[in-house]
Amino acid sequence: MRIAFYAPLKPPTHGTPSGDRRMARLLIQALEHAGHSVALASSLRSYDATPDGRRQAEIAAEGRAEAERLIAAYGAGEAPKLWFTYHLYYRAPDWLGPVVSGALGIPYLVAEASHAPKRANGPWRLGHEAAAAAIRAADAVFCMTALDQICVRPLMRDPSGMRALPPFLDAAPFVHAATERGAARRALAAPWGLDLDLPWLLAVGMLRPGDKLASYRLLAEALIRLDSRPWQLVIVGDGEAAAEVREAFAPIAARVRFLGGRDPEALPAIYAACDLYVWPAINEAYGMALLEAQAAGLAVVAGRVRGVPNVVREGETAVLVPEWDSRDFADAVAALLDDPPRRAAMAAAATAFVANERAIAPAAALLNGVVAEVCP
């Protein structure tokens, strides 16, 4: 089936790596795995970073013009049989999908929609109303976390159209990397001065202001408490807050290795080389890196935040602690450092969890089942 795909927050072709871009690409991969032909409908970004009503009105106008262009183009050529939008919310509403799918008379599906009633009368009012209208227009909405379902369900024409689609990934590269752990570890040790006999902690995330910087600062605060224990920390990522992140880790700088930004293809081996994934996840939607770490065979210590409980098995593959609590975070890391057998058992459970429940094939089957329902 021909499917038009659209991601208003960040298109899958965007040059900057992020969890949003990764999930957009994974959704396309899953739909293609199910046998569909997927084409990017538009690269128009509807994202408004600041509460600027004038800018939102401009984006809305751009969206209407782009929708009309697409309708005309599809009328003159081969039209899709279904429209699929990924990640819409008040800062990045979908101005295209409802209009184009309505004009073409095709089903409209949405993945990772969220609705924030508190934005109804605020400066993002226009985007808030557009996101709500798109949810109402959808034939089905795939929610990736239980938290999103609470506010999305009341907007749907038919609540039975809400489907749970847990975050997923292509596990194969990570599983393969885990089989080459020794080689990956040796390859990383020499150039970065890492001690093969010490446990390596790992954190992967952009070094940017806001929630990422807050997570790194809390991680530094937690690990400073563990200065008496043997460990080293590997950090993968770069960004405009690099200096602030380095400053946070200054008291334990000798134990920390900043690898900088890495291509996605290099990440599986880095995950596999390490021993424990540590990420406070301040205000994290759910965290693709948490899935990647588990796929590569790492136990996880993370904050019990928003959708994070939806991407781990708490107590089996991960230890979750209250958000913003550096003392509990430190205690959780210490407990796993002190108990290698428990850490190994959680790592094995993590690999199985992702392979059996969060890989491409199960996601493709779930998506395809709903596509078959709306396009009988």
Image (tube, rainbow, N blue to C red):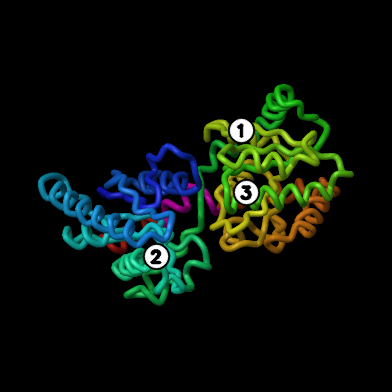
Q: For numbered disc 2, what is the local secondary structure?
A: loop
Label 2 or label 1, whichever comes before in sequence order: 2
Residue sticking out furthest to the bottom = 154
Q: Which residue bears the numbered disc 2?
A: 124
* x, y percent for residue 293: 63, 44
Residue sticking out furthest to the left = 76
In three-dimensional space, the C-alpha distance between marks 3 and 1, rounded to whole angstroms, equals 15 Å
> Relative to residue 144, is residue 178 depicted above or below?
above
> Which is nearer the eye, 247 or 264?
247
313 in the magenta segment: no
Q: Amino acid at mark 1?
A: Gly
Label 3 or label 2, whichever comes before in sequence order: 2
Q: Quadrant of the C terminus?
A: bottom left
Per the rendered image, the range of residues in magenta is 357-366
Label 3 or label 1, whichever comes before in sequence order: 3
Residue sticking out furthest to the top = 190
Q: For numbered disc 1, what is the local secondary structure?
A: strand
Q: Which residue bears the numbered disc 1?
A: 260
Q: Which residue bears the numbered disc 3?
A: 213
